Structure formats: structure tokens, C-alpha cells
């Protein structure tokens, strides 16, 4: 007799033998694993302001798009997630469809960057990259793709300079920061951010990572490492796992003043919804975002729930608004098999219809 889990002595013995075999094979696999590299696509630096650089991706063919697409990623992680490896690259998919793709690399802030503000990141850095592209391509306006926090920056910039953005794409971008299912928001709303920043200066990357990991502790501290045993006999799968781990823990520190402003204006004051966001001396009004907007969100996103992203539709000033609901999570939207065709294909087709 045995229970519903089939925990017979024979089944347990078989399981133990399979585990032993995986672990034995894993010793050989780990000895032969190569150093994992990231970035599948060649890129070249075309503009720089201090630690912030603008790169142009070079695909296998000449771009057919007449308007460049600038990617603005979040500050809290490195932007190479959009081009992680050859078979997991949103950038590669966009290039293959003829887009002319650029990306901002925010760099690694140090103590000299302690007093950088949101105005520096949005007007000086993002705005500087936009102006470079407008100037070198001879255009009044370019296409902008903002991802996560980079999407928040892109919305602010597009509100302040709607004449400089032709089409705006936001991806896993929070807009309403006070939805009931936004755990990160609940944590930060009661935070004494002045004491926090005045004490620490810049916010350490390891502390930020710890906060993100504890949003899903069982999955991110235990399950994924237990699951690693199942792939120990597969060299490529182990290298893919290590590449993802490298990205997760390759996080820059956060410039203290910009962090203070971001937490206060967005997470605590919910400024997109309630108003009152100021960048420098100018106030942000999403009603001034009057260019076409494509908003992409992930259905299983634990960092930016769909409920936080979808309110964008009712806040912006354009009538040309499109949504894409992606079946996946905050990371799957870049690296899953479905994402490789669905996300670049949707972006390209949407832009192509508005390029005429």
C-alpha cells in the first residue's frame, strides 16, 4: 500500500538513484562550463556623458526603419537583459525586422554621483541621448522604448518634450504605484527615505537585490537552486542559468538623491495619478503625452502588476493607445521563447503602421 504521493520504497530508491546520477554528471558539467558572457549583438558607443553611454546595435543587415528606436532601461539592473544571449534577445529580434536600435547604459554610480537628481537622468542623460539621435539622423522626433523604471523616465520625458518623441513604447512600466497587489509599493510607502538616504548616501546594490529577492523568497532563494539539480547534466542549460544569475547580481548602486526623489514622488505620492511630479522646475502632466503609445505588460509580473500599468490608458492625452498583454513574468518578457517573436514582432508591426 502507498499514499497518493506514491512514496513506496521502490519509488524513493529510484528517485535517489536519479538524483545521484544528476549530481555525478554535474561534476563533469561544472568542470567544463565556460565563462558565461552576455550580449549577443555587436554594439558601438556613439555618445557619452560621464558614466552614461549611448550604444548603437549592429545587426546582420542594414536597418530599413527611417526613425531610430532608443531603449531606456531601469537604473536598478544592467540593460543587457534585452540582449542576453543569441536565442534570448529582444534586440536581435528588432534588428532582424529592420529596426535601428540604440540603448542607454546608465553605468555604475559611485560616491561622486551621490547628488545626481531625476532631472539629471531624464533631462541631461535621456534628453542628451534623444538630442544626439535627432541631430545625427536629421529628425525632429525619434521612437522611444522605456522599460520598467526606464519607462517611467520615458513618460516623464515625453510629457516634457512631446515634440521630440514620435512614438512611445512602455514595457512593464508602473504608472499607478498604489494598487493593492503592488507589494514593493506597500514596503516603500511608510519608508523614511530622507533618513535612509542621508545615512547611506548611495543605496547599495546588494541591499536593493535583497529587497527584490524577498518579494518571492521561496521561489528565488530555494526553488530555483533545487531546480538546478535537474539540469546539472546539461552544459548549455547550466550556462544559461549562470548567465541569468550573473545578470541578477550585477546591479549598480543607486545615486542617493535620485533614489530619494523617485521614492517620494512615485512610490509614496503616486504622482502620475495624483499629480505633483516635478523634474527640475517643470511639472509632469501625462495628459501632454499626445504621441501614439504602445503599452506592454506581463500578466504574471510580481514587480509591476498589470493593475499598475494599465491605468496609463486613462491618463495620457493620445487617442492612439494600444496594449499588449504578455503571458509571462517580469523577466520572461525578455527571455522566454514566446517573447522572442511576440514582443519584437508586436513592436515592429506597431511602429511600421505609424511610420508612413
Image (cartoon, rainbow, N blue to C red):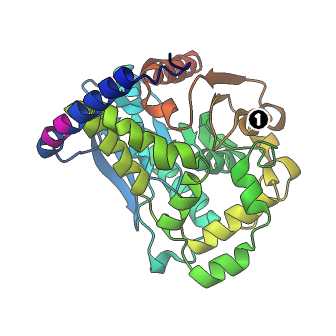
| Residue 265 seen | no
Q: Going by the image, does 118 lie left or right of 99?
A: right
Q: Residue sitting at 54 percent across and 52 percent down?
A: 213
Query: x, y (%) of residue 326?
Result: 59, 24
Front residue of this view, candidates 141 and 348: 348
- Say which residue label 1 marks: 307
- The quadrant of the picture occupied by the C terminus is top right
> Which of the pair 7/84 is nearer the observer?
7
**Is residue 252 visible in this depiction of the protein?**
yes
Q: Answer with left or right where residue 219 lies relative to residue 35.
A: right
The span picked out in magenta is 24-28
- Residue extending farthest to the front is 1
Q: Position of residue 217 (x, y in %)?
A: 56, 49
In the image, farthest residue toward the right: 274
Majority SS type along the magenta span: helix
- Identity of the residue drawn at 63% across and 44% down: 303
- As drawn, 325 above or below 211: above
The residue carrying pointer 1 sits among few (fewer than 14), some (14 to 19) or many (20 or more) residues within 10 Å by Cα, namely some
> Is 302 drawn above or below residue 258 in the view shown?
above
Q: Is residue 27 magenta?
A: yes
| 47 w.r.t. 61: above or below | below
**Coordinates of residue 119 in the picture (x, y in percent):** 63, 64
Q: Is residue 69 left or right of residue 244?
A: right
The quadrant holding residue 14 is top left
Residue at image position (61%, 37%) is: 172
Number of numbered markers: 1
| 231 drawn magenta | no
* Residue 160 location (% of width, % of height): 70, 51
Q: What residue is at 52 percent from the left and 22 percent from the top?
A: 5
Amino acid at each position: 500500500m502507498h499514499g497518493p504521493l506514491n512514496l513506496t520504497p521502490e519509488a524513493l530508491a529510484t528517485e535517489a538513484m536519479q538524483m545521484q546520477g544528476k549530481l555525478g554528471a554535474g561534476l563533469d558539467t561544472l568542470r567544463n562550463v565556460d565563462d558565461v558572457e552576455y550580449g549577443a549583438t555587436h554594439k558601438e558607443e556613439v555618445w557619452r556623458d560621464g558614466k552614461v553611454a549611448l550604444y548603437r546595435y549592429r545587426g546582420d543587415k542594414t536597418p530599413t526603419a527611417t526613425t531610430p528606436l532608443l531603449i531606456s532601461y531601469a537604473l536598478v539592473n544592467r540593460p543587457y537583459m534585452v540582449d542576453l544571449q543569441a536565442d534570448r534577445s529582444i534586440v536581435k529580434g528588432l534588428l532582424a525586422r529592420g529596426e535601428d536600435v540604440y540603448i542607454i547604459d546608465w553605468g555604475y554610480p559611485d560616491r561622486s554621483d551621490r547628488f545626481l537628481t531625476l532631472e539629471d537622468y531624464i533631462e541631461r542623460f535621456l534628453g542628451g541621448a534623444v538630442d544626439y539621435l535627432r541631430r545625427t539622423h536629421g529628425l525632429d522626433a525619434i521612437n522611444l522604448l522605456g522599460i520598467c523604471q526606464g519607462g517611467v523616465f520615458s513618460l516623464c520625458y515625453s510629457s516634457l518634450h512631446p515634440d521630440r518623441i514620435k512614438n512611445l513604447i512602455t514595457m512593464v512600466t508602473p504608472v499607478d504605484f498604489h494598487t493593492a497587489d503592488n507589494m514593493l509599493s506597500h514596503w516603500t510607502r511608510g519608508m523614511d527615505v530622507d533618513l535612509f538616504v542621508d545615512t547611506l548616501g548611495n543605496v547599495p546594490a546588494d541591499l536593493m537585490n535583497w529587497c527584490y529577492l524577498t518579494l518571492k523568497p521561496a521561489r528565488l532563494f530555494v526553488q530555483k537552486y533545487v531546480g538546478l539539480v535537474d539540469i546539472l547534466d546539461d552544459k548549455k542549460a547550466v550556462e544559461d542559468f549562470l548567465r541569468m544569475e550573473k545578470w541578477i547580481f550585477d546591479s549598480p548602486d543607486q545615486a542617493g538623491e535620485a533614489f530619494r526623489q523617485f521614492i517620494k514622488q512615485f512610490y509614496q505620492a503616486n504622482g502620475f495619478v495624483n499629480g505633483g511630479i516635478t523634474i527640475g522646475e517643470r511639472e509632469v502632466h501625462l495628459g501632454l503625452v499626445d504621441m501614439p503609445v504602445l503599452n506592454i505588460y506581463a500578466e504574471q509580473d510580481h514587480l509591476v502588476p498589470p493593475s499598475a500599468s494599465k491605468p496609463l490608458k486613462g491618463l495620457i492625452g493620445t487617442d492612439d493607445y494600444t496594449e499588449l498583454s504578455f503571458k509571462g513574468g517580469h523577466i520572461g518578457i525578455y527571455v522566454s521563447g514566446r517573447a522572442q517573436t511576440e514582443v519584437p514582432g508586436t513592436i515592429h508591426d506597431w511602429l511600421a503602421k505609424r511610420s508612413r
